[in-house]
Image (spheres, grey):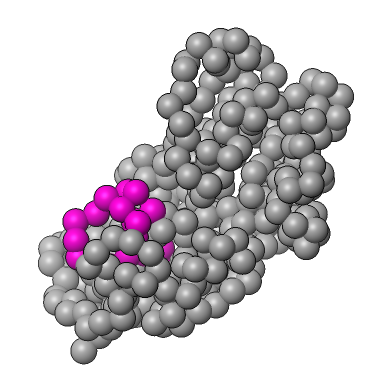
Amino acid sequence: MNKAIWVEAVGGPDVLQWSDHEVGRPGPGQLMIRQHAAGLNYIDVYHRTGLYPKSLPFVPGVEGAGEIIAIGDGVAGFSIGDRIAYAGPIGGYAEERLIDADKVVRLPNSIDFDQAAAMMLQGMTAQMLLRSVYPVAAGDTILVHAAAGGVGLILCQWAKALGATVIGTVGSKAKAGLAAAHGCDHPIIYTKQDFVAEVARITGGSKLSVVYDSVGRDTFLKSLDCLRPRGLMVSFGQASGPIEPLNLGLLAQKGSLFVTRPTLFTYMATHSELQASADELFDIVASGKVKVEVRQRFALRQASEAHRALENRETSGSTILTI
């Protein structure tokens, strides 16, 4: 019998239970995957706590990599043994799983399973943010909150490769060093420095065209003060909690600002969009301009420990659950 992590009631990390998992056979348009690794992401916490509700019980996890072991009717373009990866469909905390064939991409030989599980969601999120939500160009100066996190490290490197100047907030001196080693020109330790004042100093008072914020409640309003008139606030996470309701008049007062709350799944709703995003990610990783490092590993059965570490901000970069 295969095993998986199940959530039968929402709550803290202890609700993650290691239990039997009956997979079944792939239906039409589906693949069965034997997983090698699953990615750990903050959206998994949102699902576990019920912030993003799911029907109970469920297997969490929206990112993984493995090999195809069975193919359902009507699937073309894949073979048994193909190495694949995905980001999006929930159910990744499992030894084996079913998934729709149009939600996966084939892995190039240069990307191993662990690296793929660590980069698909975070890397394609970075691609969406830098290439679609706000196309960053040479000469731009940007602010990345949580610059030493999984998405943050990729954002810093990729933006640097595009010719941008990168300002990033981090929580400690060690994380400042990590961010700096991955393309962050100006790490700001938010526990010791006022990031609004630092942004004004670094930019000579001209401020920024875009802020990328995955922190949420603790950073949102102050981030608006980092933007120049008609600047864009990109809120793509809420690690510190949900953002309070916003009076839209505030955006006018602060310079006709724009705010967006993008989700990766909207930007890769079709397989062609998914493939294009993944191809660009694979290319920049293969070029060496972006390095995706697995900085923490937990066995899948230790998912609750991994969630505690993530929520306590004890992790940096990418974390995977090995299977």
Quadrant containing the N terminus is bottom left
Residue 185 or 164: which is nearer the viewer?
185
The main secondary structure of the magenta stretch is loop
User: How far across and how far down the image is residue 214, in percent?
Assistant: 55, 44
Residue 209, relative to residue 272: is it above or below? above
Residue 246 or 251: which is nearer the viewer?
246
Residue 229, relative to residue 233: is it above or below? above
Residue 98, relative to residue 50: is it above or below? below
**In the picture, residue 80 is in which quadrant?**
bottom left
Q: Answer whether residue 75 is magenta in the image.
A: no
Residue 54, relative to residue 99: is it above or below? above
**Left or right: 140 as drawn, with respect to 303:** right
Q: Residue at x 54, y 15 (%)?
A: 250
User: How far across and how far down the image is residue 18, in percent?
Assistant: 31, 81
Q: Residue at x 38, y 64 (%)?
A: 12
Asked whether residue 222 appears in the rendered view, the answer is: yes
Q: Residue at x 64, y 49 (%)?
A: 146
**Left or right: 134 as drawn, with respect to 60:** right
User: How far across and how far down the image is residue 150, in percent?
Assistant: 59, 58
Q: Answer whether residue 65 is magenta in the image.
A: yes
Q: In this view, which residue lies farthest toward the bottom?
A: 1
**Left or right: 159 as drawn, with respect to 46:** right
Quadrant containing the C terminus is bottom left
**In the picture, residue 115 is in which quadrant?**
bottom right
Residue 223 or 14: which is nearer the viewer?
14
Q: Residue at x 53, y 47 (%)?
A: 240
User: How far across and how far down the image is residue 258, in percent?
Assistant: 54, 20
Over which residues does the magenta segment extend?
46-66
